[in-house]
Image (cartoon, coloured by chain):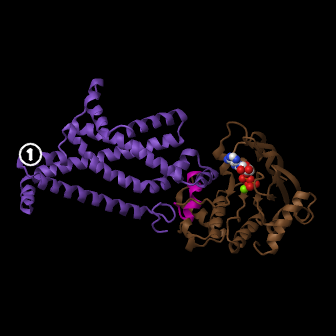
Amino acid sequence: MIDDILYIVERYWPLLLEGLKNTIIITAASYSIGVALGLSLALLRSYGPKALAAAVTAYVEAFRGTPMLVQLFIVYYSLPAFGIVLDPLTAAIVAIGLNSGAYQSEYFRGALAAIPRGQWEAALSIGLRKWAAVRYVILPQAWRVALPALTNELIYLLKYSSIAYFVTVPELVFMGKYIGSRTYMYLQVYTVITVIYVTLALTISEGMSRLERRLSVPGVSITGRGQ
Amino acid sequence: MTVVLKVEDLWKSYKKNEVLRGVTFSVNEGETKVIIGPSGTGKSTLLRCINLLVRPDKGRIFLDGEEITRPGINEARVRSRIGFVFQHFNLFLHLTALENVMLGLTKVKGMPKEKAEEAAKKALLSVGITEDLWHKYPAQLSGGQKQRVAIARAIAMNPRLILFDEPTSALDPELIGEVLKVMEKLAKEGMTMLVVTHEIGFAMKVADEVMFMDGGRIIERGPPQEVILRPKNERTRRFLSRIWELYDLGVRG
Ligand SMILES: Nc1ncnc2c1ncn2[C@@H]1O[C@H](COP(=O)(O)OP(=O)(O)O)[C@@H](O)[C@H]1O
Ligand SMILES: [Mg+2]
């Protein structure tokens, strides 16, 4: 078994590396879209005009209430009917990013709601306008509160990025299947892939908790570090 | 005498609950007025109306002669001229003591950072918050220190008036004194203040006028010696006798 694994790594490392690269690209890009979108949606839903907030709610429920795979197929196969043709990698990034945005908006919304009312009142009382209060008082606290959930989301996306396989993006799982079909050593191949995923997840976890520690302020983060 | 704050026939209800029922008074420049009264009688609501955090149903409020309750008023500008000290301090939790005081200076007044820092340090020193505490976060400060930082945050904005909503009610008894001392000093220096408190010792010493609120109205007002020592109204008398009891038991003061 060890020999088989070494053989696979030795023989197919360029393919594995290519798969790893695509997995990282999908994860990083869709996560970035998700953070930006999620934050904007949460702010609109929490503090924006009523009509917009309702539209955001509809968006969030639609994306949370349907399978991500269906969303991916819609982006990849149905958008061309409206003149929007995306290559597989872009389609995967867009679909996963839109989906993640819906989830992340909920994390951010929860974090915004968790900021004590008194913080708002104090911000307004010194003469900050609503959006300045959000920017300088509410957000800096809210995103520290949201950080643990955002870490989990990044690890989810790392795993969910594999659905790009269904629109033929050569990411890690795709490469695993391909190498398996060439060598018939499925178990060994998937062991290698698993090790790669776990290593990535641990790295993310460690990186994020370092970030959390660096940003942690006594009395602010919900993890309670440094209190 | 310059009138800084004038409150004219203020009414406010929450649903069927009439919280303010025709409150009228004014505060002159350099005066300290104290409001006392049982809880739930609308004292906080009154202060929040003055700071435009709550819109009254009826009545008008003037700051330096300008009606601030008129539609279309620049609320943020009005608030920047009125300090507010909260019962639960409400320091910005993610900012150090120094940064708490600086935020309004840089983001509201548009001061350059160095100048804001200088002004903030001056304000902190004036409330007895020394250099060793400037870079501490609120969670690392005692209640008394927090409240003094909150007062510094208000002072630094150079407001026309500071509102205090039970500034010592959330403090351990042994920390109340340091906050009252700072407030007393502020009053002596000529700050215009409107203070909701049950600290009758403070009121006796500092207040130019004491107003007793009950059921959304000011039912008795006058110099502290009269309202506190010789209240005319039956309800004032009953309320004060309870406060005196606490005083004698040594729970406060
Ligand atoms: N935002 C609000 N919504 C509904 N009721 C409120 C609100 N704020 C205050 N009240 C009610 O108004 C009354 C007066 O409250 P408050 O002004 O806080 O009194 P005090 O400060 O004298 O204790 C209370 O009965 C309180 O429940
Ligand atoms: Mg109150």
Q: Is residue A7 magenta?
A: no
Front residue of B43/B5: it is B43
As drawn, is A216 to the left or to the right of B134?
left
Q: Residue at image x 50%, y 34%?
A: A54
**Res. A154 in view:** yes
Q: Colour of chain A?
A: purple
Total count of labels: 1
Residue B55 location in percent, x, y? 70, 42
Where residue A74 sits, quadrant-wise, is top left
Secondary structure mostly seen in the magenta stretch = helix
As drawn, is A191 to the left or to the right of B238?
left
Residue B173 location in percent, x, y? 71, 72
Residue B197 location in percent, x, y? 76, 62
As drawn, is A107 to the left or to the right of B219?
left
Q: Residue at image x 64%, y 52%?
A: A125
Q: Give the residues in magenta.
A: B94-108
The chain carrying label 1 is A
